[in-house]
Amino acid sequence: MIGMAEDRVRAPRALVGVTGCIAAYKACEVVRGLQKAGCEVRVAMTEAATAFVGPLTFEALTGRPVLVDLGTFADTPIGHVELAEWADLVLVCPATADVLAKAVAGVADDALTSTLVAAWDHVAFAPAMNVHMWRSPATQANVATLRERGAHLVMPATGRLACGDVGEGKLADVEEVVDHALRLLARAVVPQRLAGRRVVVTAGPTHEAIDPVRYVANRSSGKMGYAVARAARDAGAEVTLVTGPSALRGPAGCEVVRVTSAREMLEAATSAFEGADAAVCAAAVADYTPAAPADHKLKKDAERLDVLEMRETADVLATLSAAKGGRVVVGFAAETGDPVAAARSKLERKGCDLIVANDVSRADSGFGTDTDAVTIVGPDGASEHPCLPKDEVARLIVGRVADLLGA
Protein backbone atom coordinates (compact mmCIF):
# COMPACT_ATOMS: atom_id res chain seq x y z
CA MET A 1 0.00 0.00 0.00
CA ILE A 2 1.12 3.57 -0.64
CA GLY A 3 0.15 4.88 2.76
CA MET A 4 -1.90 4.15 5.85
CA ALA A 5 -5.27 5.86 6.14
CA GLU A 6 -4.05 8.36 8.74
CA ASP A 7 -1.12 9.35 6.49
CA ARG A 8 -3.12 10.40 3.45
CA VAL A 9 -6.27 12.28 2.54
CA ARG A 10 -7.68 9.58 0.21
CA ALA A 11 -6.68 6.64 -1.92
CA PRO A 12 -4.49 7.53 -4.91
CA ARG A 13 -6.23 7.44 -8.28
CA ALA A 14 -4.63 5.89 -11.34
CA LEU A 15 -6.02 5.82 -14.87
CA VAL A 16 -4.32 3.09 -16.90
CA GLY A 17 -4.34 3.73 -20.65
CA VAL A 18 -4.01 0.60 -22.77
CA THR A 19 -2.92 0.72 -26.41
CA GLY A 20 -2.81 -1.79 -29.27
CA CYS A 21 0.23 -3.91 -28.51
CA ILE A 22 0.88 -7.58 -27.74
CA ALA A 23 1.97 -6.48 -24.26
CA ALA A 24 -1.57 -5.20 -23.57
CA TYR A 25 -2.31 -8.30 -21.49
CA LYS A 26 0.31 -7.18 -18.97
CA ALA A 27 -1.81 -4.11 -18.26
CA CYS A 28 -4.11 -6.47 -16.35
CA GLU A 29 -1.24 -7.27 -13.99
CA VAL A 30 -0.41 -3.59 -13.66
CA VAL A 31 -4.01 -2.83 -12.69
CA ARG A 32 -3.95 -5.57 -10.05
CA GLY A 33 -0.60 -4.38 -8.72
CA LEU A 34 -1.90 -0.84 -8.28
CA GLN A 35 -5.06 -2.11 -6.61
CA LYS A 36 -3.06 -4.23 -4.17
CA ALA A 37 -1.16 -1.08 -3.23
CA GLY A 38 -4.43 0.61 -2.26
CA CYS A 39 -5.09 2.62 -5.43
CA GLU A 40 -8.38 3.34 -7.12
CA VAL A 41 -7.90 2.29 -10.74
CA ARG A 42 -9.83 2.99 -13.91
CA VAL A 43 -8.99 2.11 -17.50
CA ALA A 44 -9.13 3.80 -20.90
CA MET A 45 -8.36 1.90 -24.12
CA THR A 46 -7.73 2.61 -27.75
CA GLU A 47 -9.87 0.71 -30.24
CA ALA A 48 -6.76 -1.21 -31.32
CA ALA A 49 -6.16 -2.36 -27.75
CA THR A 50 -9.52 -4.11 -27.63
CA ALA A 51 -8.24 -6.57 -30.24
CA PHE A 52 -5.74 -7.85 -27.67
CA VAL A 53 -7.72 -7.59 -24.40
CA GLY A 54 -11.47 -7.03 -24.19
CA PRO A 55 -12.85 -4.10 -22.18
CA LEU A 56 -14.91 -6.60 -20.17
CA THR A 57 -11.68 -7.92 -18.62
CA PHE A 58 -10.78 -4.52 -17.23
CA GLU A 59 -14.36 -3.84 -16.17
CA ALA A 60 -14.27 -7.05 -14.15
CA LEU A 61 -10.95 -6.08 -12.56
CA THR A 62 -11.88 -2.50 -11.69
CA GLY A 63 -15.65 -2.73 -11.27
CA ARG A 64 -15.95 0.41 -13.40
CA PRO A 65 -16.80 1.03 -17.07
CA VAL A 66 -13.86 1.30 -19.44
CA LEU A 67 -13.47 4.39 -21.61
CA VAL A 68 -13.15 3.15 -25.21
CA ASP A 69 -14.76 5.94 -27.21
CA LEU A 70 -16.02 9.42 -26.45
CA GLY A 71 -19.57 8.10 -26.17
CA THR A 72 -18.80 5.41 -23.58
CA PHE A 73 -20.27 7.32 -20.65
CA ALA A 74 -23.93 8.04 -21.37
CA ASP A 75 -24.24 10.55 -18.54
CA THR A 76 -21.53 12.92 -19.81
CA PRO A 77 -20.20 14.05 -23.19
CA ILE A 78 -16.76 14.84 -21.72
CA GLY A 79 -15.78 11.58 -20.04
CA HIS A 80 -12.18 12.02 -21.17
CA VAL A 81 -11.91 15.39 -19.39
CA GLU A 82 -13.57 14.09 -16.23
CA LEU A 83 -11.20 11.10 -16.09
CA ALA A 84 -8.19 13.36 -16.66
CA GLU A 85 -9.26 15.53 -13.74
CA TRP A 86 -10.12 12.50 -11.57
CA ALA A 87 -6.74 10.80 -11.98
CA ASP A 88 -3.65 11.65 -9.96
CA LEU A 89 -1.67 9.85 -12.67
CA VAL A 90 -2.45 8.66 -16.17
CA LEU A 91 -0.22 5.66 -16.88
CA VAL A 92 -0.12 4.55 -20.52
CA CYS A 93 0.90 0.90 -20.43
CA PRO A 94 1.83 -0.34 -22.90
CA ALA A 95 2.57 2.81 -24.89
CA THR A 96 3.02 2.24 -28.63
CA ALA A 97 5.15 4.37 -30.95
CA ASP A 98 1.91 5.70 -32.42
CA VAL A 99 0.60 6.96 -29.07
CA LEU A 100 3.95 8.51 -28.13
CA ALA A 101 3.92 10.43 -31.40
CA LYS A 102 0.33 11.53 -30.91
CA ALA A 103 1.07 12.69 -27.38
CA VAL A 104 3.92 14.87 -28.66
CA ALA A 105 1.80 16.34 -31.44
CA GLY A 106 -1.25 16.83 -29.23
CA VAL A 107 -3.39 14.66 -31.49
CA ALA A 108 -6.75 13.83 -29.86
CA ASP A 109 -8.41 11.47 -32.31
CA ASP A 110 -9.84 8.92 -29.86
CA ALA A 111 -10.85 8.66 -26.22
CA LEU A 112 -7.40 7.84 -24.83
CA THR A 113 -5.44 10.45 -26.75
CA SER A 114 -8.09 13.04 -25.90
CA THR A 115 -7.62 12.16 -22.25
CA LEU A 116 -3.85 12.55 -22.60
CA VAL A 117 -4.21 16.05 -24.00
CA ALA A 118 -6.36 16.99 -21.00
CA ALA A 119 -4.01 15.31 -18.50
CA TRP A 120 -0.73 16.62 -19.93
CA ASP A 121 0.82 17.49 -16.54
CA HIS A 122 0.40 14.09 -14.82
CA VAL A 123 1.20 11.42 -17.37
CA ALA A 124 3.61 8.48 -17.44
CA PHE A 125 4.40 6.17 -20.36
CA ALA A 126 5.66 2.58 -20.32
CA PRO A 127 6.66 2.02 -23.97
CA ALA A 128 6.59 -1.37 -25.70
CA MET A 129 7.38 -1.95 -29.36
CA ASN A 130 9.73 -3.59 -31.85
CA VAL A 131 13.42 -2.77 -31.34
CA HIS A 132 13.70 -1.02 -34.72
CA MET A 133 10.66 1.13 -33.95
CA TRP A 134 12.10 2.00 -30.56
CA ARG A 135 15.49 2.96 -31.99
CA SER A 136 14.04 5.07 -34.78
CA PRO A 137 15.08 8.75 -34.62
CA ALA A 138 11.42 9.79 -34.59
CA THR A 139 10.58 7.68 -31.54
CA GLN A 140 13.70 8.78 -29.68
CA ALA A 141 12.93 12.41 -30.44
CA ASN A 142 9.38 11.93 -29.18
CA VAL A 143 10.64 10.36 -25.95
CA ALA A 144 13.03 13.26 -25.41
CA THR A 145 10.27 15.79 -26.06
CA LEU A 146 7.87 14.11 -23.64
CA ARG A 147 10.52 14.16 -20.93
CA GLU A 148 11.25 17.83 -21.55
CA ARG A 149 7.55 18.54 -21.06
CA GLY A 150 7.50 16.74 -17.70
CA ALA A 151 6.14 13.34 -18.67
CA HIS A 152 7.61 10.30 -16.95
CA LEU A 153 9.00 7.31 -18.85
CA VAL A 154 9.37 3.74 -17.58
CA MET A 155 11.97 2.70 -20.09
CA PRO A 156 11.58 -0.58 -21.95
CA ALA A 157 13.72 -3.61 -21.19
CA THR A 158 16.05 -5.50 -23.49
CA GLY A 159 15.15 -9.06 -24.42
CA ARG A 160 13.45 -11.31 -26.90
CA LEU A 161 10.44 -9.55 -28.41
CA ALA A 162 7.16 -11.07 -29.54
CA CYS A 163 8.23 -10.76 -33.18
CA GLY A 164 11.37 -12.78 -32.52
CA ASP A 165 13.82 -9.85 -32.63
CA VAL A 166 16.14 -9.30 -29.69
CA GLY A 167 16.84 -5.83 -28.31
CA GLU A 168 15.22 -2.86 -26.57
CA GLY A 169 11.48 -2.45 -26.73
CA LYS A 170 10.17 -5.07 -24.33
CA LEU A 171 7.73 -3.67 -21.79
CA ALA A 172 9.47 -3.11 -18.46
CA ASP A 173 8.77 -5.69 -15.77
CA VAL A 174 5.30 -5.26 -14.27
CA GLU A 175 6.74 -4.80 -10.79
CA GLU A 176 8.96 -1.99 -12.08
CA VAL A 177 6.06 -0.27 -13.85
CA VAL A 178 3.90 -0.46 -10.72
CA ASP A 179 6.70 0.82 -8.49
CA HIS A 180 7.32 3.83 -10.75
CA ALA A 181 3.60 4.60 -10.75
CA LEU A 182 3.34 4.30 -6.98
CA ARG A 183 6.28 6.67 -6.54
CA LEU A 184 4.51 9.29 -8.67
CA LEU A 185 1.14 8.70 -7.02
CA ALA A 186 2.62 9.12 -3.55
CA ARG A 187 3.37 12.75 -4.29
CA ALA A 188 -0.36 13.40 -4.68
CA VAL A 189 -1.62 11.76 -1.49
CA VAL A 190 1.23 11.16 0.99
CA PRO A 191 2.35 14.10 3.15
CA GLN A 192 5.89 15.01 2.07
CA ARG A 193 7.21 15.17 5.62
CA LEU A 194 10.75 14.30 4.55
CA ALA A 195 10.97 16.60 1.54
CA GLY A 196 14.48 18.02 1.34
CA ARG A 197 15.85 15.34 3.67
CA ARG A 198 18.33 12.60 2.88
CA VAL A 199 17.87 9.13 4.36
CA VAL A 200 20.19 6.13 4.28
CA VAL A 201 18.64 2.67 4.58
CA THR A 202 20.54 -0.61 4.93
CA ALA A 203 18.88 -3.86 3.93
CA GLY A 204 19.38 -7.56 3.44
CA PRO A 205 22.02 -9.97 4.69
CA THR A 206 25.76 -9.91 4.21
CA HIS A 207 27.76 -12.80 2.78
CA GLU A 208 31.07 -13.49 4.51
CA ALA A 209 33.41 -15.47 2.29
CA ILE A 210 34.92 -18.78 3.37
CA ASP A 211 36.40 -19.24 -0.11
CA PRO A 212 35.36 -18.05 -3.60
CA VAL A 213 32.43 -20.51 -3.55
CA ARG A 214 31.23 -20.77 0.06
CA TYR A 215 30.12 -18.13 2.51
CA VAL A 216 28.50 -17.55 5.90
CA ALA A 217 25.16 -15.73 5.84
CA ASN A 218 21.72 -15.46 7.46
CA ARG A 219 18.12 -15.74 6.28
CA SER A 220 17.37 -12.07 5.74
CA SER A 221 15.54 -11.37 2.46
CA GLY A 222 15.87 -7.58 2.52
CA LYS A 223 12.10 -7.05 2.38
CA MET A 224 11.92 -4.83 5.44
CA GLY A 225 14.75 -2.54 4.39
CA TYR A 226 13.40 -2.20 0.87
CA ALA A 227 9.98 -1.32 2.30
CA VAL A 228 11.57 1.38 4.49
CA ALA A 229 13.38 2.79 1.46
CA ARG A 230 10.09 3.02 -0.47
CA ALA A 231 8.29 4.61 2.48
CA ALA A 232 11.00 7.24 2.94
CA ARG A 233 10.97 7.93 -0.80
CA ASP A 234 7.19 8.31 -0.77
CA ALA A 235 7.48 10.78 2.10
CA GLY A 236 9.68 12.97 -0.10
CA ALA A 237 13.15 11.95 1.03
CA GLU A 238 16.19 11.46 -1.16
CA VAL A 239 17.03 7.85 -0.36
CA THR A 240 20.22 5.83 -0.60
CA LEU A 241 19.60 2.10 -0.15
CA VAL A 242 22.70 0.12 0.80
CA THR A 243 21.74 -3.50 0.24
CA GLY A 244 23.41 -6.81 0.75
CA PRO A 245 22.71 -9.70 -1.64
CA SER A 246 18.98 -9.78 -2.36
CA ALA A 247 16.70 -10.95 -5.15
CA LEU A 248 14.54 -7.83 -4.75
CA ARG A 249 14.36 -5.09 -7.36
CA GLY A 250 15.74 -1.73 -6.26
CA PRO A 251 12.93 0.77 -5.57
CA ALA A 252 12.36 3.31 -8.34
CA GLY A 253 13.69 6.74 -7.47
CA CYS A 254 16.20 5.50 -4.89
CA GLU A 255 19.96 5.33 -5.24
CA VAL A 256 20.85 1.66 -4.77
CA VAL A 257 24.33 0.65 -3.61
CA ARG A 258 24.88 -3.12 -3.71
CA VAL A 259 27.43 -4.68 -1.39
CA THR A 260 28.33 -8.19 -0.31
CA SER A 261 30.24 -8.26 2.98
CA ALA A 262 29.85 -6.54 6.35
CA ARG A 263 33.01 -4.53 5.66
CA GLU A 264 31.60 -3.29 2.35
CA MET A 265 28.28 -2.41 3.99
CA LEU A 266 30.06 -0.41 6.69
CA GLU A 267 32.07 1.53 4.10
CA ALA A 268 29.05 2.25 1.88
CA ALA A 269 26.72 3.17 4.77
CA THR A 270 29.33 5.43 6.40
CA SER A 271 29.97 7.22 3.12
CA ALA A 272 26.26 7.72 2.39
CA PHE A 273 25.57 8.91 5.94
CA GLU A 274 28.02 11.80 5.63
CA GLY A 275 25.46 13.96 3.85
CA ALA A 276 22.30 12.41 5.31
CA ASP A 277 19.79 13.47 7.95
CA ALA A 278 18.86 9.97 9.11
CA ALA A 279 19.78 6.31 8.78
CA VAL A 280 17.56 3.27 9.22
CA CYS A 281 19.73 0.18 9.69
CA ALA A 282 17.43 -2.67 8.73
CA ALA A 283 20.16 -4.94 7.37
CA ALA A 284 20.96 -8.19 9.16
CA VAL A 285 24.72 -7.68 9.12
CA ALA A 286 26.74 -10.77 9.98
CA ASP A 287 28.26 -10.59 13.47
CA TYR A 288 31.19 -12.78 12.48
CA THR A 289 33.29 -13.36 9.38
CA PRO A 290 35.88 -16.03 8.58
CA ALA A 291 39.26 -14.88 9.88
CA ALA A 292 41.23 -16.14 6.88
CA PRO A 293 39.10 -16.72 3.78
CA ALA A 294 40.80 -18.86 1.17
CA ASP A 295 41.60 -17.48 -2.25
CA HIS A 296 40.68 -20.80 -3.89
CA LYS A 297 37.92 -23.36 -3.53
CA LEU A 298 38.74 -25.61 -0.57
CA LYS A 299 38.76 -29.30 -1.44
CA LYS A 300 36.99 -31.36 1.20
CA ASP A 301 39.29 -34.34 0.73
CA ALA A 302 42.46 -32.28 1.33
CA GLU A 303 41.39 -29.05 3.10
CA ARG A 304 38.66 -30.01 5.51
CA LEU A 305 36.54 -27.40 7.33
CA ASP A 306 36.28 -29.18 10.67
CA VAL A 307 37.08 -25.87 12.35
CA LEU A 308 36.32 -22.41 10.96
CA GLU A 309 38.05 -19.60 12.82
CA MET A 310 35.89 -16.48 12.99
CA ARG A 311 36.36 -12.87 14.01
CA GLU A 312 33.83 -10.14 14.80
CA THR A 313 32.73 -7.78 12.06
CA ALA A 314 32.57 -4.03 12.41
CA ASP A 315 29.29 -2.77 13.91
CA VAL A 316 27.45 -0.65 11.33
CA LEU A 317 24.70 0.54 13.70
CA ALA A 318 27.12 1.50 16.49
CA THR A 319 29.43 3.27 14.05
CA LEU A 320 26.67 5.42 12.57
CA SER A 321 25.21 6.11 16.03
CA ALA A 322 28.58 7.31 17.32
CA ALA A 323 28.86 9.75 14.42
CA LYS A 324 25.24 10.94 14.29
CA GLY A 325 25.40 14.14 16.32
CA GLY A 326 21.95 15.68 15.90
CA ARG A 327 20.94 13.23 13.20
CA VAL A 328 18.59 10.28 13.62
CA VAL A 329 19.65 6.63 13.60
CA VAL A 330 17.24 3.68 13.85
CA GLY A 331 18.30 0.08 14.39
CA PHE A 332 16.58 -3.31 14.36
CA ALA A 333 16.60 -6.22 16.79
CA ALA A 334 15.59 -9.50 15.15
CA GLU A 335 15.36 -11.75 18.19
CA THR A 336 13.88 -14.88 19.68
CA GLY A 337 12.65 -15.14 23.27
CA ASP A 338 12.10 -11.60 24.58
CA PRO A 339 12.71 -9.16 21.70
CA VAL A 340 11.66 -6.06 23.67
CA ALA A 341 14.14 -6.66 26.48
CA ALA A 342 16.85 -7.32 23.90
CA ALA A 343 15.90 -4.11 22.09
CA ARG A 344 16.12 -2.01 25.24
CA SER A 345 19.58 -3.39 25.93
CA LYS A 346 20.66 -2.82 22.33
CA LEU A 347 19.33 0.76 22.35
CA GLU A 348 21.52 1.57 25.34
CA ARG A 349 24.62 -0.19 23.98
CA LYS A 350 24.48 1.20 20.45
CA GLY A 351 23.46 4.77 21.25
CA CYS A 352 20.82 5.04 18.51
CA ASP A 353 17.46 6.81 18.73
CA LEU A 354 15.09 3.89 18.18
CA ILE A 355 15.20 0.11 17.95
CA VAL A 356 12.56 -1.84 16.04
CA ALA A 357 12.17 -5.24 17.72
CA ASN A 358 10.54 -8.30 16.21
CA ASP A 359 10.37 -11.98 17.12
CA VAL A 360 11.78 -13.89 14.15
CA SER A 361 10.64 -17.20 15.61
CA ARG A 362 7.04 -16.29 14.69
CA ALA A 363 5.79 -17.70 11.40
CA ASP A 364 4.22 -14.35 10.47
CA SER A 365 7.11 -12.11 11.54
CA GLY A 366 10.36 -13.76 10.54
CA PHE A 367 12.85 -13.49 7.73
CA GLY A 368 11.27 -13.57 4.28
CA THR A 369 7.70 -12.97 5.42
CA ASP A 370 5.51 -10.19 4.03
CA THR A 371 4.28 -9.18 7.49
CA ASP A 372 5.82 -8.16 10.80
CA ALA A 373 4.68 -7.67 14.37
CA VAL A 374 7.02 -5.11 15.88
CA THR A 375 7.64 -3.05 18.97
CA ILE A 376 9.36 0.30 18.45
CA VAL A 377 11.55 0.99 21.47
CA GLY A 378 12.88 4.45 22.33
CA PRO A 379 14.36 6.17 25.40
CA ASP A 380 10.87 7.25 26.48
CA GLY A 381 9.11 3.90 26.13
CA ALA A 382 7.89 1.32 23.68
CA SER A 383 4.97 1.16 21.25
CA GLU A 384 3.71 -2.27 20.28
CA HIS A 385 2.15 -2.87 16.87
CA PRO A 386 0.17 -5.92 15.74
CA CYS A 387 1.08 -8.02 12.73
CA LEU A 388 0.98 -5.72 9.68
CA PRO A 389 2.25 -5.79 6.10
CA LYS A 390 5.90 -4.79 5.99
CA ASP A 391 5.05 -1.70 3.92
CA GLU A 392 2.80 -0.46 6.73
CA VAL A 393 5.45 -1.19 9.35
CA ALA A 394 7.89 0.78 7.20
CA ARG A 395 5.57 3.78 7.18
CA LEU A 396 5.30 3.64 10.96
CA ILE A 397 9.08 3.73 11.19
CA VAL A 398 9.42 6.55 8.69
CA GLY A 399 6.76 8.50 10.56
CA ARG A 400 8.81 8.18 13.77
CA VAL A 401 11.91 9.33 11.90
CA ALA A 402 10.02 12.38 10.66
CA ASP A 403 8.85 13.11 14.20
CA LEU A 404 12.41 12.97 15.51
CA LEU A 405 13.60 15.27 12.74
CA GLY A 406 10.86 17.73 13.62
CA ALA A 407 9.29 17.35 10.17
Image (cartoon, rainbow, N blue to C red):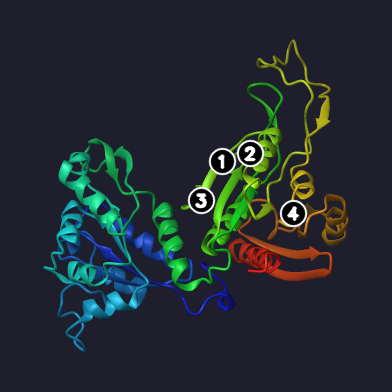
Q: Which of these two is toward me, 84 or 70?
A: 84
Sequence order check: which comes first, mark 1 or mark 4?
1
Label 1–label 3 contact, CB within 8 A: no
x and y percentages locating residue 168 in the rendered image: 28, 40
Q: Quadrant of residue 35?
A: bottom left
Q: Is residue 324 placed above or below 18 in the rendered structure?
A: above
Q: What is the three-letter code of the residue carrying label 2?
A: Ala
Mark 1 surroundings within 10 Å by alpha-carbon count, few (fewer than 14), some (14 through 19), many (20 or more): some
The label shown at residue 257 is 1
Give the CA separation, mark 4 to mark 2: 18 Å
Sequence order check: which comes first, mark 2 or mark 3?
3
Sequence order check: which comes first, mark 4 or mark 2?
2
Q: What is the three-letter code of the residue carrying label 1?
A: Val
Residue in the picture at 82% in, 21% down:
306
Give the CA separation, mark 1 to mark 3: 10 Å
x and y percentages locating residue 86 in the rendered image: 33, 78
Label 1–label 2 contact, CB within 8 A: yes
Q: Which of these two is toward me, 216 or 168?
A: 168
Q: Is residue 303 placed above or below 119 in the rendered structure?
A: above
Q: Can residue 203 be seen in this view?
A: no
Give the CA separation, mark 2 to mark 3: 15 Å
Q: What is the three-letter code of the residue carrying label 4?
A: Phe
Q: Is residue 324 visible?
A: yes
Q: In this view, does 16 lie to the left or right of 104?
A: right
Q: Mark 2 points at which residue?
A: 268
Mark 4 surroundings within 10 Å by alpha-carbon count, few (fewer than 14), some (14 through 19), many (20 or more): many
Q: Name the residue under label 3.
A: 254
x and y percentages locating residue 133 in the rendered image: 18, 43
Give the CA separation, mark 3 to mark 4: 21 Å
The label shown at residue 332 is 4
